[in-house]
């Protein structure tokens, strides 16, 4: 018995291991569950008639931090989503539904919603082009290489730009003529930051970027920020000087995001025991703690919780509003 992922959830499957005079060995997996709950950690009962498993109803509420009240409040109507990205003119928002991992866009007020990706594939890490006409994202299907893709604001057939195992977080560079992303063919420690030139189609590796994850280019196109795979350090690449700067925040580094006008880099400290959101002021490298997350129940989707910012640079996180219980499922041999 095993679990296969479906989006960020999972379904239970079984394979017959032994044969008898009534049953021949059939190695074809048999699906035991099919939504809406996500199941994991299956254990058969002693008599083999039941399966005990943890069932989860996956859902989040997108929440922004209100600095005036010191509280998190529902944002964008409290949609269940992740990877939120705003167009440069502030009129449109793109996001991935959670847990379905489908790319949508809408007006900031929630009107004119449009699904941009097919339900046959999972997508992640949306990012608007500087001109607001396209969205870059990563598309994934089991058993196939990830795809760095583009889709128009108003839908249509996506354009695949690059394929490889484990692609992560595209962002735009050079005024929209290049896309920067992470490629980690094996483990995060082996990740590299790649640059795709959209005019030539050539992909190059950013110098000295081995072991850097979740790269993100600043809106003013001056810097690239990335954390190290061990979550201990933050590195900034100056595109003009073609040089790196390195910082070691006491709290560690998880997800990063630039403020809209680029003077600050916000970051959290991932899954540490004293979670919080910080920001680094680029002008003088001053680091300060912005939000305490110790009693906040976040969704963990992937290696680290997602962090975003509103157009006014207010931190945005995924509040976990799902449920988790142990279920006893009747099992009949197929």
Image: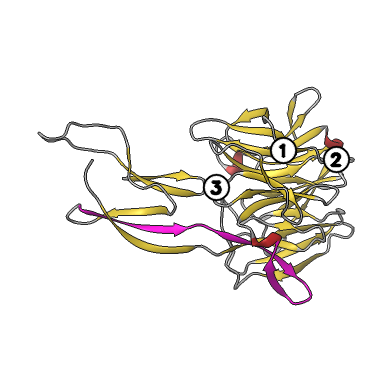
> How busy is the neighbourhood of tag 3: few (under 14 within 10 Å), some, or many (20 plus)?
some
> How busy is the neighbourhood of tag 1: few (under 14 within 10 Å), some, or many (20 plus)?
many
- Residue range in magenta is 49-75
- Residue indicated by mark 1: 136
The reply to whether the C-beta atoms of the residues labelled 2 and 3 are less than 8 Å apart is no
State whether residue 160 is above or below residue 88.
Answer: above
The answer to whether 225 appears left or right of 19 in the picture is right
* Image quarter of the N terminus: top left
- Residue indicated by mark 2: 239
- State the residue at coordinates (49%, 35%): 142
- Please check the rendered image and state whether residue 66 is part of the magenta-colored stretch, yes or no: yes
Secondary element type, mark 1? strand
Query: Which comes before the other along the chain, label 2 or label 1?
Result: 1
- Residue indicated by mark 3: 100
Mark in front: 3 vs 1 = 3
Furthest residue in direction bottom, as rendered: 69
Q: In this rendering, does residue 212 appear at all? A: no
Image quadrant where residue 313 sits: bottom right
Q: How is the image coloured?
A: secondary structure
- State the residue at coordinates (55%, 65%): 321
Q: Percent from the top left, x then y, of residue 138?
A: 64, 38
State whether residue 312 is above or below residue 130.
Answer: below
Mark in front: 2 vs 3 = 3
Query: Which comes before the other along the chain, label 2 or label 3?
Result: 3
């Amino acid at each position: 018995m095993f679990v296969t992922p479906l989006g960020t959830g999972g379904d239970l499957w079984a394979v017959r291991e032994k044969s008898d005079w009534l049953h021949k060995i059939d190695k074809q997996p048999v699906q035991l569950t099919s939504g809406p709950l996500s199941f994991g950690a299956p254990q058969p009962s002693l008599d083999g008639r039941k399966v005990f498993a943890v069932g989860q109803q996956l859902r989040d509420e997108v929440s922004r931090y209100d600095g005036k009240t010191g509280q998190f409040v529902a944002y964008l109507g409290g949609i269940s989503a992740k990877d939120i990205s705003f167009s440069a003119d502030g009129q449109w928002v793109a996001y991935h539904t959670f847990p379905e991992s489908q790319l949508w866009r809408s007006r900031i007020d929630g009107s004119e919603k449009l699904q941009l990706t097919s339900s046959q594939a999972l997508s992640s890490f949306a990012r608007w082009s500087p001109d607001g006409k396209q969205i870059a994202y990563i598309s994934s299907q089991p058993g196939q290489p990830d795809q760095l893709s583009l889709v128009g604001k108003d839908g249509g057939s996506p354009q695949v730009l690059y394929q490889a195992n484990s692609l992560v977080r595209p962002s735009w560079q050079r005024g929209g003529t290049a896309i920067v992303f992470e490629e980690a063919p094996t483990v995060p420690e082996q990740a590299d930051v790649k640059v795709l030139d959209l005019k030539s189609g050539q992909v190059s590796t950013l110098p000295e970027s081995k072991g850097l994850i979740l790269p993100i280019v600043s809106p003013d196109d001056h810097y690239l920020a990335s954390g190290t795979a061990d979550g201990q350090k933050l590195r900034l690449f100056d595109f003009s000087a073609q040089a790196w700067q390195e910082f070691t925040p006491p709290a560690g580094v998880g997800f990063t995001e630039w403020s809209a006008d680029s003077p600050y880099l916000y970051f959290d400290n991932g899954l540490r025991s004293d979670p919080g959101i910080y920001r680094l002021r680029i002008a003088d490298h001053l680091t300060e703690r912005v939000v305490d997350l110790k009693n906040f129940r976040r969704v963990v989707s992937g290696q680290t919780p997602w962090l975003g910012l509103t157009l006014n640079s207010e931190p945005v996180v995924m509040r976990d509003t799902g449920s988790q219980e142990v279920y006893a499922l009747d099992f009949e041999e197929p």
